[in-house]
Image (cartoon, helix red, strand yellow):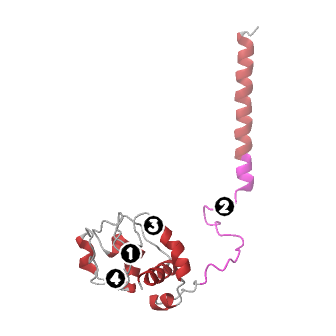
Amino acid sequence: MFDTMTITKAGGALCGALLVFLLGAWAAEELYHTGGHGKHSEQAYVIETGDDEVAEVEEEVPFEVVLASADPDRGERVFGKCRACHKLEDGANGTGPHLYGVVNRAVASEDFGYSGALSEVAEVWTPENLNGFLESPRNYAPGTSMGFAGLPDVEDRANLIAYLANIGS
């Protein structure tokens, strides 16, 4: 069937094919290499993309302006992220304290085991304090036991605060 000569021929064919492939790759690299080394390495042409222009800095709108145009109906949808731990019924605490009337309520005023970090940063849950806390609870009140990452979008925070303000009034 197979003898040593057949195996030798197959091995030689593989080595020959590899040699042809490597020589072809070397020749193609020499033919099509566009430079990058030496004194002749400057680019032959430049495509203008407009990246050299400084991007316009978007001015940050004050939170009060965003809050004034907030939509409580959209805030109700954002509250879905809070629903797992917080309840809206007065006095019905969940994993977190109830949020009924939380806007302009004293911090840690309810029957709930708050972490001391919250009372150190604010006395009243004003819309501005809620905005800072909801953006990043761990950055706003280091040491807080709230394990929520936060709401990065200022419009989501404003809509949620408008929704919570309507619930408690």
Label 2 crowd (10 A; few <14 / some 14-19 / many >=20): few
Residue 103, how many percent across, how many down? 38, 83
Picture quadrant of residue 55: bottom right
Q: Which residue is mark 1?
A: 99
Q: Earlier in the sequence, mark 2 or mark 1?
A: 2
Q: Which residue is mark 4?
A: 125
Q: Quadrant of the N terminus?
A: top right
Q: Quadrant of the C terminus?
A: bottom left
Q: Earlier in the sequence, mark 3 or mark 2?
A: 2
Residue at 35% from the left image edge and 69% from the top image edge: 92
Q: CA distance from mark 3 to mark 4?
A: 19 Å
| Left or right relative to 56: residue 18 | right
Residue at 43% from the left image edge and 84% from the top image edge: 165
Secondary structure at numbered mark 4? loop
Please check the rendered image and state whether residue 35 is part of the magenta-colored stretch, yes or no: yes
Label 4 crowd (10 A; few <14 / some 14-19 / many >=20): some
**Comparing marks 3 and 2, which lies closer to the viewer?**
3
- Magenta segment boundaries in residue numbering: 27-53
